[in-house]
Image (cartoon, rainbow, N blue to C red):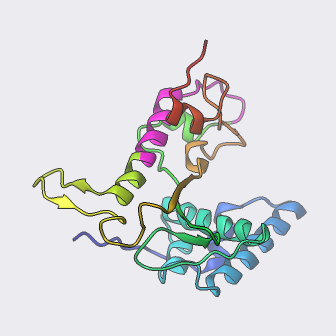
Amino acid sequence: MTRTTFQTMDLKASIERRYPWTSAKGSEIREAVCELCMRILGSNLVDGDAEKKLCSENPNAFWQQLSEILLADQLITAGLKPLHQEPGPDFLIDLGKGRLWIEVVTPEPRGLPDEWINHVSGNVVSLPHEEILLRWTSAIKEKAEKLLGRADRKTGERIPGYIEKGIVTPSDAYVIAINGRLLRGFGGAIPELHGISQLPYAVEATFAARYR
């Protein structure tokens, strides 16, 4: 088994690195994010290594973990009562007449051109639509396999999913929540959550919508 290791910094420094704006609004955002992280970290709604991931030098680890924290906060704000268990999907909500599981994923920007990911303001850059869409479909496939299971790519041996393990039942609802933050790049505020069809990437990835 391959273990992921993280070089870490303290939480405040990690948040300052990801939200470096020097304005008063920037300071306000950093304080709000830090407060939110501390609150959710103490709520038993995240894995035991959540703080280490938030303090990681690896931006992918940071944004994946922050995505889970942001969604936990949104669920609570909506009046829901999410639960978290290991092993299993990130969140469980008892709806009374059924159960809803939520698995959070923040696709890494593999295969996206550097001029997009690290866009320099004022420079013209093409939207890497196909590459972004591929990251969405890959994320959906990965999380679907965690539910349904898959065959090992090298040995062909069956790797059971949440249903076979008895964690999720066939009658439960299972939602894949995708945060496309890492696919937007870090050179500026490029809110490219819509594909060339003018519909969200979530629609393109699941319904094969295309530009007409």
Among the 4 quarters of the image, the one containing residue 169: bottom left
User: Is 124 within the magenta?
Assistant: yes
> Compared with residue 148, is residue 41 higher up or lower down, i.e. above or below?
below
Q: Is residue 61 visible?
A: yes
Q: Is residue 104 visible?
A: no
User: Is 201 within the magenta?
Assistant: no
Question: Residue placed farthest to the top in the image?
Answer: 212
- Left/right placement of residue 170 relative to residue 172 reads left
Nearer to the camera, 2 or 147 = 147
Among the 4 quarters of the image, the one containing residue 26: bottom right
Q: Residue at x 70, y 39 (%)?
A: 191
Q: Residue at x 49, y 64 (%)?
A: 61
Nearer to the camera, 113 or 97 = 97
- Left/right placement of residue 204 relative to residue 189 reads left
Q: Residue at x 47, y 61 (%)?
A: 171
Q: Residue at x 40, y 76 (%)?
A: 87
Question: Residue placed farthest to the right in the image?
Answer: 24
Q: x, y percentage for residue 14?
A: 61, 71
| Quadrant location, the C terminus | top right
Q: How many marks?
A: 0
- Left/right placement of residue 66 relative to residue 143 reads right
| Quadrant location, the N terminus | bottom left
The segment highlighted magenta reads 121-140
Q: x, y percentage for residue 210?
A: 56, 20
Question: Residue placed farthest to the bottom in the image?
Answer: 42
